[in-house]
Image (cartoon, rainbow, N blue to C red):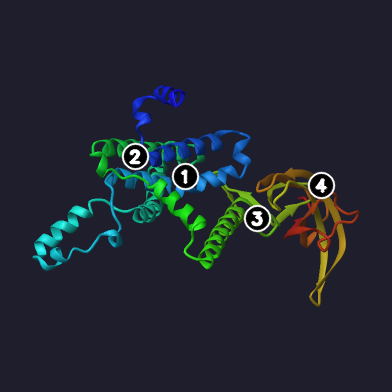
Amino acid sequence: MADDSTWRLLIPAPLRQLPADLVAVIALVLATVMVVVTPVLDETPLRVVLGLPFVLFLPGYALIAALFPEAGDSPTDQPADDATLEGDDDSERDTEDSERDGIDGIERVALSFGLSIAVVPLIGLVLNFTPFGIRLLPVLVSVAGVTLALTAVAAHRRRALPPDERFRVPYRAWLQTTRQEFTSPDSRLDGVLNILLVVSILLAVSSVAYAVAVPKQGEAFTESYLLTEQENGTLVADNYPTEYTVGEPRPIIVGIGNQEHRDVEYSLVVELQDVRVQNNSSTVLAEEELRRLRTNVAAGETWHHELNVTPSMQGERLRLAFLVYMGDPPAEPTVENAYRETHLWVNVSAPE
């Protein structure tokens, strides 16, 4: 015991006197910041496990602790006083107000969730008008700073109150009640129901944690599209070149978006085709391959590339096809066997 007391004396007095719930808030905030900024830990489920209460609970709890440092009783815990009830209304209201200076634990938990949902978006709104913007690091530092500042205010306000009026989390009462429920239940049925309740809660929490930490992947797909560049440099899906001259290049931008949830190596084949369309079917009469490219696109990324299309086949209403394949293209690339396909109908005239 002496060694333990000596060790506690090494901690600064303000920290040593902090209430246990505020110490837990500070510890969770610091742990969340450490996990998010550490390169290895930021890819583990700890980021989700700590991040959810960091955003959805801790800021609101710190704010409630700062606003209501007093202890409060649940209305069901207040004994009814027959003498008071028979007295005048003013006396009754004064007695109730003196007993309900603070809020109870259940109210604190409920308000903590609600206020967190209000406080965090306000922090994001303020950041949006600063040079930092709404990015991970500024949001992390701001939410952590606000939570720690509110915790400091809460600790100061509690310390200013008499000890018997300060809010305290009744850990010992909870532990004693829990121990009695399992070791000395009123009946065997109550004991079985208590065990089933604990198992149900553990299963529910585990299911939610797994669903958040390992989200179900959405649909996997690849986007393929064409763009043109305006005079101001903006890329738009409009004003495509449709009139070409043999031997004269015209630029067009090809885009490939990878939503396959993995890195993919794509092949792009550009062909100019003379197509006859009859009875809802098309037949390629002649074709020429203009370009062939390969590119690796990371998961969730988009690849843009400017191509200079230089046709050598003359004709009207020719199909300029951009064929996208995953991996190597087949020996004879066609619109039918392409993984993704985009095309334009163009006219190619002879040079003057």
As helix, strand or loop, the secondary structure at mark 4 comes to strand
* Residue labelled with disc 1: 54
* Residue labelled with disc 4: 292
Spatial CA distance of label 3 from label 2 is 57 Å
Report whether residue 249 is seen.
no
| Callout 4 touching callout 2 (CB < 8 Å) | no
Q: Residue at x 85, y 49 (%)?
A: 328
Q: Residue at x 34, y 39 (%)?
A: 150
Q: Quadrant of residue 239?
A: bottom right
* Residue labelled with disc 3: 240
In the picture, the disc for residue 224 is: none
Counting labels gives 4
Identity, as a three-letter code, of the amino acid under mark 3: Tyr
Identity, as a three-letter code, of the amino acid under mark 2: Leu
Would residue 206 appear left or right of 224 to someone viewing this image?
Answer: left
Identity, as a three-letter code, of the amino acid under mark 1: Phe
Q: Residue at x 77, y 61 (%)?
A: 319
Of 307 and 94, the residue lying toward us: 94
* Residue labelled with disc 2: 150
Q: Is residue 123 above or below residue 319?
A: above
Would residue 191 appear left or right of 329 to someone viewing this image?
Answer: left
Mark toward the start of the polypeptide (4 vs 3): 3
